[in-house]
């Protein structure tokens, strides 16, 4: 079956030129994605990287077969606090579909340990087990590693629910790599807007975890902030899992910036913020990103963190209410950051597998946009079982998820999403201050 090759040639830079609009909103909108997609009568048209196109029939036909799905997410390591709930969101479709479909669902869940080498080993296990599509990974560094070394060479589909680095856009991936959160090329714009308009800051510094997620998001913020008239005194990198971050904090705060943007993960964030409140003025505004959106962070740090706010992709899709209810019923707690994106990543992979009619990565990749993008019968988390049957029979469908409308562009990136501007509650918890919607 033909594959799309060399498709990552659209989003090459960071800045306002690639964004059609960026404005605050207070509703639950995630965008219906009515301005693009693969319309047509049960077919999808894919580019093969040249001047020709090939048309692939959709609809696998049989429902009395097994759909195999891998899950590759961190339940240990630096992202363990966030990774376990994200894993729970990724496997929730299996629970919801139990007894509701003729398909047998075979899931294999692997731990990346928030480590590229461990993740590659776990991904090899999924390949050996014949799992053609995988929900994962979480960390952008890990996603790039497993994509380049396992998924792409093996012809496996990877759909990340949490990797936001712009570097993923440029992977030469043969149409195999997708993601359900938006790229950080856009989050940088949101951070810059918040820093200037909410925090009245004209100067800034950044502290970022030293990997592709941290570095590129820092650069995205700097570019956007400078474009609206701000100045950045320093960009300070730091390593994960250090016993002290005092010297790195001193470098970031040396020029008394109006705001400091901190990009990292909870395990490192605990020590970083303990050092901050022990040695620095706790009134300086700090902005964090999705990687530090942990409800337990204030209690872990031992400080209410009232000077800290942040941005993160927000669940604002048509299926959000149903997902929230199912997640709470199954796990006894509120869904967290990227949990709804994880549900959607798995759901799209399952629908694409049903449409492909076989556990084959190349065949599934040909159906990822066809089952998600505008055009066809609407499928949401609440009628996912019916959606599998329709996909298998060749009915044209459009999945609208819990996190967003899940409208993929030619790079496997989202066409539209919503960001949350959040704060921490004393003793634990997250408070949504506002919502910011964008369209790419």
Image (cartoon, rainbow, N blue to C red):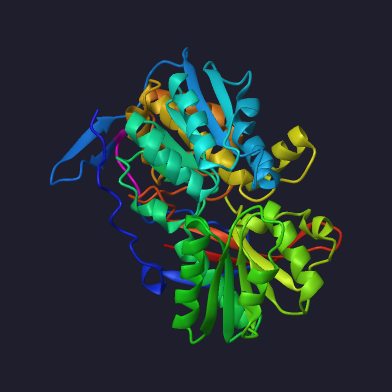
List the single residue furthest toward the left.
51
Residue 254, x across and y down, in percent = 63, 82
Residue at horizontal 55 percent and vertical 45 percent from the top? 138
**Rendering quarter of residue 283:** bottom right
**Rendering quarter of residue 397:** top left
Q: Quadrant of the N terminus?
A: top left
Residue 324, x across and y down, in percent = 70, 44
Q: Main secondary structure of the magenta part?
A: loop
Residue 367 visible in rendering: no
In the image: residue 52, left or right of residue 393: left
Residue 185 visible in rendering: yes
Residue at horizontal 41 percent and vertical 73 percent from the top? 16
Residue 275, x across and y down, in percent = 76, 67
**Rendering quarter of residue 5:** top left
Write the start and end of the magenta stretch as one range. 37-43
Q: Nearer the viewer, residue 423 or 144?
A: 144
Q: Is residue 42 magenta?
A: yes
Residue at horizontal 56 percent and vertical 24 percent from the top? 108
Q: Quadrant of the C terminus?
A: bottom left
Instruction: Please tell me how many numbered marks the rendered image carries.
Output: 0
In the image: residue 131, left or right of residue 319: left
Q: Nearer the viewer, residue 220 or 200?
A: 220
Q: Is residue 187 magenta?
A: no
Residue 233, x across and y down, in percent = 54, 82
């Amino acid at each position: 079956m033909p594959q799309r090759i060399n498709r990552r040639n659209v989003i090459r830079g960071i800045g306002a030129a690639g964004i059609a609009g960026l404005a605050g909103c207070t509703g639950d909108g995630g965008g219906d994605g009515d301005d693009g997609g693969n319309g047509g009568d049960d077919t999808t048209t894919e580019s093969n990287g040249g001047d020709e196109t090939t048309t692939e029939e959709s609809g696998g036909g049989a429902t009395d077969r097994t759909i195999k799905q891998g899950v590759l997410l961190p339940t240990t390591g630096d992202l363990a606090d966030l990774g376990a709930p994200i894993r729970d969101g990724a496997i929730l479709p299996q629970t919801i579909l139990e007894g509701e479909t003729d398909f047998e669902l075979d899931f294999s869940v692997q731990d990346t340990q928030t480590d590229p080498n461990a993740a590659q080993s776990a991904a090899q296990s999924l390949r050996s087990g014949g799992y053609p599509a995988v929900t994962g990974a979480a960390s952008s560094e890990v996603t790039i590693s497993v994509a380049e070394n396992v998924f792409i060479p093996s012809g496996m589909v990877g759909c990340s629910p949490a990797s936001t680095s712009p570097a993923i856009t440029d992977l030469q991936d043969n149409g195999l790599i997708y993601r359900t959160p938006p790229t950080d090329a856009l989050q940088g714009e949101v951070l810059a807007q918040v820093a200037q308009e909410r925090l009245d800051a004209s100067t800034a510094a950044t502290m970022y975890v030293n990997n592709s997620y941290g570095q590129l998001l820092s650069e995205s913020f700097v570019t956007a902030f400078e474009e609206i008239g701000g100045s950045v005194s320093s960009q300070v990198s730091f390593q994960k899992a250090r016993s002290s971050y005092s010297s790195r904090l001193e470098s970031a705060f040396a020029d008394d910036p109006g705001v400091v943007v901190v990009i990292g993960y909870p395990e490192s964030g605990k020590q970083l913020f303990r050092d901050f409140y022990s040695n620095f003025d706790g009134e300086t505004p700090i902005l964090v990103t999705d990687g530090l959106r942990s409800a337990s962070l204030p209690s872990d740090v031992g400080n209410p963190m009232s000077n800290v706010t942040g941005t993160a992709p927000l669940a604002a899709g048509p299926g959000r209410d149903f997902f929230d209810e199912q997640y709470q019923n199954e796990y006894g707690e509120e869904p967290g950051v990227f949990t709804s994106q994880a549900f959607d990543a798995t759901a799209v992979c399952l629908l694409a597998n049903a449409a492909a009619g076989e556990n084959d990565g190349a065949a599934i990749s040909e159906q990822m946009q066809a089952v998600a993008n505008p055009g066809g019968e609407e499928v949401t988390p609440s009628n996912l079982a019916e959606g599998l049957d329709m996909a298998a029979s060749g009915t044209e469908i459009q999945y609208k998820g819990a996190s967003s409308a899940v409208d993929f562009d030619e790079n496997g990136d989202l066409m539209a999403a919503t960001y949350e501007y959040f704060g921490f509650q004393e003793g634990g918890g997250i408070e949504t201050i506002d919502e910011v919607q964008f369209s790419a």
